[in-house]
Every structure is written in structure tokens, then in C-alpha cells.
Image (cartoon, helix red, strand yellow):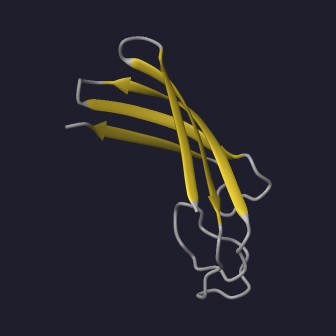
Amino acid sequence: MFYSLHLDYMLTCRLYALWEFTGIHYLESGRALPGVTVEGSDLINLGAGAVAGNHFASTAFGMMYRLTNQMTLGAAYEFPVTDREDLMDNRTTVNLSWTY
């Protein structure tokens, strides 16, 4: 089960601060890798055989800049907030969104 919360706040007419919180709760274990206790979070599904009931959560802070009325450029730094990290220690993401 995957969940996500995104909040942003307009600082200027083009610049936004953002905060995100995401989590994964493993309802079932996979069958591909019996005995493996680490999963790939939102990057890859490894099929680990011993993850049922585990929970992973992370938070991110970043900024978004409205380039045009249809395009937004954003960047964020994300890190785990639970003891469980799976494959993620921390990461920086950049995205370009086009709204039509």
C-alpha cells in the first residue's frame, strides 16, 4: 500500500516551497527472492520474500518554479523518517511538469 501527501506554498507569483511525505506498507511478501528482507521502495519491485508487515516512510523538502503557465520546474531532497530504509539512504529529484 503506497500513500503520499504533497503540500506547497506560494512564495512569489512563480516560486513555491514544497513538502512531501510518502510511505509504503508491505501487505504481502513477494515470491522471487525468498528470505530477502529488503525491498526496492518506489524504485523497483524486487519481489522480496520476507517483507510482509514492514513499513517505510520518507519526507522531502524542495522548491518549484513556474516557467510558464503550463510548465513548472521543481527539485527536492528526500530522506527516510523511519528506521527502515530499504534501498534509499537519501536522494535528490528534479522534475519538469507540463500541464495541458
Q: Quadrant of residue 72?
A: top left
| Residue 89 can be seen, yes or no | no
Q: Is residue 25 left or right of residue 16?
A: right
Residue 61 screen position, x and y as percent: 59, 33
Vertical side of 64 occupied by 48: above or below: below
Direction left: furthest residue: 100
Q: Residue at x 73, y 75 (%)?
A: 37
Residue 48 screen position, x and y as percent: 64, 79
Residue 77 screen position, x and y as percent: 58, 38
Direction right: furthest residue: 83
Vertical side of 53 occupied by 3: above or below: above
Q: Residue at x 58, y 80 (%)?
A: 47
Q: Residue at x 65, y 68 (%)?
A: 26
Q: Quadrant of residue 87?
A: bottom right
Q: Is residue 13 left or right of residue 32?
A: left
Q: Is residue 83 left or right of residue 41?
A: right
Q: Residue at x 73, y 80 (%)?
A: 50
Q: Is residue 67 left or right of residue 26?
A: left
Residue 95 screen position, x and y as percent: 39, 41
Report the number of numbered marks: 0
| Residue 43 can be seen, yes or no | yes
Q: Quadrant of the C terminus?
A: top left
